């Protein structure tokens, strides 16, 4: 075990690396499939919602969720920026 300072033979290391690579490829393949599903979902609803608007709405909600209690500060900053940046 690497954490315990034990050493592995080269064959064991190669085997572990192969295992790691296979698992990584599987995960990356699943991520790609999920991203394709996500794109198809947005495409299905493009006649209902403007794609750039719904994508921005999803992004905004994720940002708000990530900020938690700081959302009030975000809203204050946005309000000030709207006043200053209005063209």
Image (spheres, helix red, strand yellow):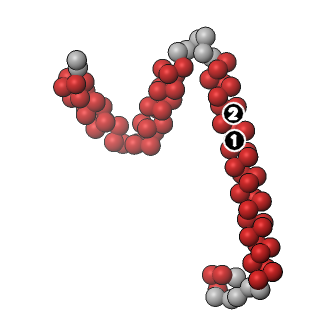
Whether 51 is drawn above or below 16: the answer is above
Q: Residue at x 64, y 86 (%)?
A: 4
The N terminus lies in quadrant = bottom right
Asked if 64 appears above or below 45 in the picture, the reply is: below
Provide the residue designation for mark 2: 36
Q: Position of residue 56 (x, y in %)?
A: 47, 27
* Contact (Cβ within 8 Å) of mark 2 with mark 1: yes
Side of 53 where 1 appears, left or right = right
Looking at the image, which residue sits at the far left? 84
Gap in Å between the C-alphas at discs 2 and 1?
A: 6 Å
Where residue 23 sits, quadrant-wise, is: bottom right
The image's mark for residue 32 is 1
**Location of residue 43 by image quarter:** top right
What secondary structure is marked by label 2? Answer: helix
At x 40%, y 43%, the residue is 67
Q: Nearer the viewer, residue 46 or 18?
A: 18
Q: Quadrant of residue 18?
A: bottom right
């Amino acid at each position: 075990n690497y954490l315990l300072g034990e050493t592995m033979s080269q064959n064991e290391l190669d085997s572990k690396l192969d295992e790691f690579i296979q698992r990584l490829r599987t995960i990356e393949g699943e991520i790609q499939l999920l991203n394709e599903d996500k794109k198809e979902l947005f495409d299905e609803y493009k006649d209902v919602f403007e794609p750039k608007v719904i994508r921005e709405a999803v992004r905004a909600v994720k940002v708000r969720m990530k900020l938690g209690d700081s959302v009030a500060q975000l809203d204050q900053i946005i309000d000030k920026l709207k006043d200053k940046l209005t063209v």
